Amino acid sequence: MAYSIPFNRPALTGRESQYIGEALAAGHLSGDGPFTKRCGGWLERQTGVHRALLTTSCTHALEMAALLLDIRPGDEVIMPSYTFVSTANAFVLRGGVPVFVDIRPDTMNIDENLIEAAITSKTRAIVPVHYAGVGCGMDKVNAIAAAYKLAVVEDAAQGLMAAYKNQPLGAIGELGCLSFHETKNYTMGEGGALLIRDPERAAMAEIIREKGTDRGRFLRGEVDKYTWQSAGSSYLPSELNAACLWGQLEAAAEILNDRLAIWDRYAAAFAGDERFETPKIPEHCQHNAHMYWIKCKDAEQREALRRHLAEGGIQAASHYVPLHTSPAGSRFGRFAGEDRYTTAESERILRLPLWYGLSAQEQMRVVETTLEFFKKI
């Protein structure tokens, strides 16, 4: 079905084609060329980490994190069930066991107060997911990790340009993973990045990303030939992808401000309406307007609203099916404690169109069509 207002439209600043053309003209199409380095340097300055390595996806950034932590069969990794499959898959591929913890209904993030009860002698890491670019309770997450000597890997796929207590998401734990998929605020089509705070880990991450070799050192003239050093894979994106991303990062503030204005218009239009729930951003979180959602009474009402919007040419989207309810989730992992909110809240949430360039007129159509639905019930 064709929608006059799609749920998502990839951000385009107009610079992407120019930079891709420059990369083609330069004749350097494989990774780690000038645009790759520009993007990595920008991310390092923006987040304050020691090293930011572009990857072919956030999935691969998470897989690199699992390799860096040397996750082994039977190791347990605590995470929310309300997340994309990559959060769990990265550790399952190493033989790890996802241990799912319930979420907070206000942010849809992992409930930091339930993490400690899920820890066992096999626990190796905690993976908080910053849903919608709203930060998890990282003070408590890091305190628990320190007390039990656990690693913290932030799944900040949706979190670039957002912060928790003025700390950039993805740069608060030991490792952070970003996404540049076309559905994210900044895109290279498919892509991601691994953020690393520790210099020693950064050196090892470079080897893992280059198929387990020290090719990076060779290119810098630090060794006379490169050799196989460790297990690794081909996680390095092409220079063409990086050139596309550079066109976005140069305009990062412009894109952020446009999205925030759209988010604020939704919030103002729906303020005080008690027929459905809307996002509440905790005071200590600086979000990046990655998405605007509403929560209906139940799954039946949500689907009715989705159909009503579709009839008006507007595409809205639900989100994750909780991993622990899926065939693979029940096979590879387990839920710790009570599923009080994860499943119930996942069935109520509906995401409205929000993308760079969405006009005020288009947005008001979304608002008016949504309110029209609730007037009828």
Image (cartoon, rainbow, N blue to C red):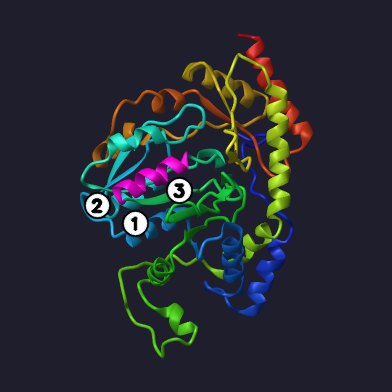
Q: Nearer the viewer, mark 3 or mark 2?
A: 3
Disc 2/disc 1 C-alpha distance (Å): 10 Å
Asked if residue 262 lies in the magenta stretch, the reply is no
Give the residue number, with chain letter if any, for mark 1: 66
Badge 1 marks a residue whose secondary structure is helix
The numbered dot on residue 155 is 3
Amino acid type, label 3: Asp
The answer to which image quadrant residue 307 occupies is top right
Q: Is residue 140 magenta?
A: yes
Q: Which residues are magenta?
A: 137-149
- Main SS, magenta region, reads helix
Q: Looking at numbered disc 1 in the image, what kind of residue is underneath it? A: Ala
Q: Earlier in the sequence, mark 3 or mark 2?
A: 2
> Which numbered mark, 2 or 1, is in the foreground of this view?
1
Q: Residues within 10 Å of mark 1 (few under 14, many from 20)?
A: many
Residue 200: which quarter of the image?
Answer: bottom left
In the rendered view, tell whether residue 28 sits above or below residue 271: below
Q: Between residue 347 and residue 273, name the one nearer to us.
A: 273
Residue located at (68% from left, 54% from top)? 252
Q: Residues within 10 Å of mark 3 (few under 14, many from 20)?
A: many
Position above or below: 348 against 4: above
Q: Earlier in the sequence, mark 3 or mark 1?
A: 1
Q: Which amino acid type is shown beneath numbered disc 2?
A: Gly
Going 38% across and 33% down the picture, which residue do you hit? 113
Q: Residue furthest right?
A: 361
Which numbered dot is residue 95?
2
Q: Residue at x 42, y 40 (%)?
A: 140
Element type at mark 2: loop
What distance separates the C-alpha of mark 3 from that of mark 1? Answer: 12 Å
